[in-house]
Amino acid sequence: MRVAVFSAKAYDKRFLSEANEAFGYTFKFFEPHLDESTVRLASGYDAVCAFVHDDLSRPTLQALAEAGVKLVALRCAGYNNVDLAAAQEYNLTIVRVPAYSPHAVAEHAIALILGLNRRIYRAYNRVREGNFSLEGLMGFDLHGCTAGVVGTGKIGVLVAKILKNGFGCEVVAYDPYPSKACQDLGIAYASLPELLSQADIVSLHCPLSPETHHVINEASIQQMKPGAMLINTSRGALVDTRAAIEGLKSGQIGAMGLDVYEEEGDLFFEDLSTQVIQDDQFTRLLTFPNVLITGHQAFFTENAVRNIAETTLANIREFESGGPCANQVHAPQRRGA
């Protein structure tokens, strides 16, 4: 099996190559994103391995199929960048890594909460400059505050558990499909408006879909408890950036921690330190002293990246063996079908 790996970084090469020792596939690593302009690089390969910012829209998938590619192995959990209907039409199998390390993402969400609450990033910079003043660094006890967890899959349940059992928060959850694991923790579910009105901290842990796109918008921000903290380690487009900026300016959002951003595709995973960032909304976010942004690194632990590589290789082996593929992503069924 010949596999073209797109959006490949040094760590992808290391962990995929290590995992491949047990499989013996032929890998070719390409640094560019996979899209219409780079799809020609996949010619002659049986499969492509893609990441979150690769463009797997209809034109790209059509070109992959015409090049003889049969499998798209996503080394991530999300697949909102894939036109699943087109993939089915072109007889392309899509597989993903549904769970690599929920602990990694959950722990990063907690790190953002703590960093924002205790102003760790500001304190660090002050001390390096010899400034030991405490003015402007006051936080609040997490113990006893109310935390709202939006989305209670594996990551959301872990965040709820850490906040409740580790910090003594009152936790309320929202999910159209309540989790028994969350209920067993004694966590009550509420409607989204109810959660937003109660929570001192709102942490987002839901997938991106038409229903969740801009779930945090102008209207829902107004439903939030004034001065609440907003955390997003899921998908950038869950938050309407323009509305969030207005919420920060008015004080309705008291602090915001982001590991994802809705227009991150041209920013994250690249070194742009010598360039002028052209995204005005992103640069506006960087001006707020109560905003903490990391570059989509919540998943980035050695445990998680190794699990991603191993699961990706196992997915390819299942496909090569004729399936079925346990981690295959299927196009949604049409109503009435």
Image (cartoon, helix red, strand yellow):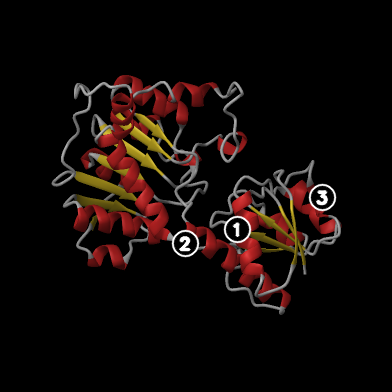
Q: Which badge, 1 or 3, comes first in the chain's sequence?
A: 3
Query: In this view of the protein, can residue 224 be seen by the observer?
Result: no
Residue drawn at the location 45% of the way across and 41% of the way down: 259
Image location of residue 142, percent across then percent down? 18, 44
Which residue corresponds to mark 1? Answer: 75
Closer to the camera in the image, 201 or 131: 131
Mark-to-mark CA distance, 1 and 3: 18 Å
Q: Is 331 rendered above or below residue 123?
A: below
The local secondary structure at tag 1 comes to loop
Which residue corresponds to mark 3? Answer: 41
Mark 3 packing: few (<14 Cα in 10 Å), some, or many (20+)?
Answer: some
Mark-to-mark CA distance, 2 and 3: 30 Å
Is label 2 or label 1 in front? 2
Residue drawn at the location 52% of the way across and 36% of the way down: 262
Q: Which badge, 2 or 1, comes first in the chain's sequence?
A: 1
Residue drawn at the location 41% of the way across and 53% of the way down: 105
Amino acid beneath label 2? Asn
The local secondary structure at tag 2 comes to helix
Side of 220 relative to 310 (left or right): left
- Residue 303's label in the rendered image is 2
Q: Total of numbered circles in the picture? A: 3
Q: Quadrant of the N terminus?
A: bottom right
Amino acid beneath label 3? Leu
Closer to the camera in the image, 115 or 51: 115
Image location of residue 163, percent across then percent down? 24, 52
